[in-house]
Image (cartoon, coloured by chain):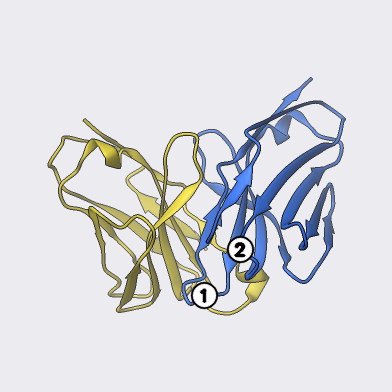
Amino acid sequence: NAGVTQTPKFRILKIGQSMTLQCAQDMNHNYMYWYRQDPGMGLKLIYYSVGAGITDKGEVPNGYNVSRSTTEDFPLRLELAAPSQTSVYFCASRHRGTTRGETQYFGPGTRLLVL
Amino acid sequence: GEDVEQSLFLSVREGDSSVINCTYTDSSSTYLYWYKQEPGAGLQLLTYIFSNMDMKQDQRLTVLLNKKDKHLSLRIADTQTGDSAIYFCAESINTGRRALTFGSGTRLQVQP
């Protein structure tokens, strides 16, 4: 199993540009999450999904959109990039039940710089 | 509300024990976790504890949970230079989304 994969690893965007951060998992997990990590801070929840076709907002959803058309994929869309979106983005997934204490498995992250 | 706090920095000598502390505010936490993040890398789960437990030991790691004071600690025995990293405390709350609330992380520096 590859686990949780994210692409790209690093991207520079100009203000106002759009991009999609890709996330995929091959563990057949129902739950998937997008977090952002600002320098020196913990992770904040952007969006989450409890299954294909079901998504909902987290703590910091403004400026982002998500979709979940399959169990495996959970892309994050930035429509109009702003400098405040400079961050490291982590995707995570977990099984529905209490397997391993509801552990979330994280991808390696996408580092985004908006100039 | 959800809030998780950690001290920012800890420095220890190789071979000593490290103790990283965390406080949380939400009494409906179901699980509490410790994640490790090395520079430029993702988050690696170290261990977790269910909220009705007081202690959990896993090789060099010991987790202590004081529910009354909402205090969680991670003890690393015989700390090695490879343990240098940022350690995040996180809680999972009994809501539908079961997302994690993270502290800001404690940077552990291990001096040879």
Could you say where residue A11 lies in the image, as x and y percent from the top left? Answer: 28, 38
Given the image, what chain letter belongs to the residue carrying mark 1?
Answer: B
Residues marked 1 and 2, same chain: yes
* Viewer-side residue, B26 vs A67: B26
Depth order, front residue of B80/B25: B25
Give the amino acid at mark 2: Asp
Image x and y of residue B39, in percent: 54, 33
Q: Which chain is indicated by disc 2?
A: B
Q: Note whether A14 is above or below A109 in the view shown.
A: above
Q: Which chain is blue?
A: B
* Chain coloured yellow here: A
SS under mark 2: loop
**Which of the numbered marks, if any, corresponds to residue B95?**
1
**Which amino acid, mark 1?**
Thr
Q: How many marks?
A: 2
User: Viewer-nearest of labels 1 and 2?
Assistant: 2
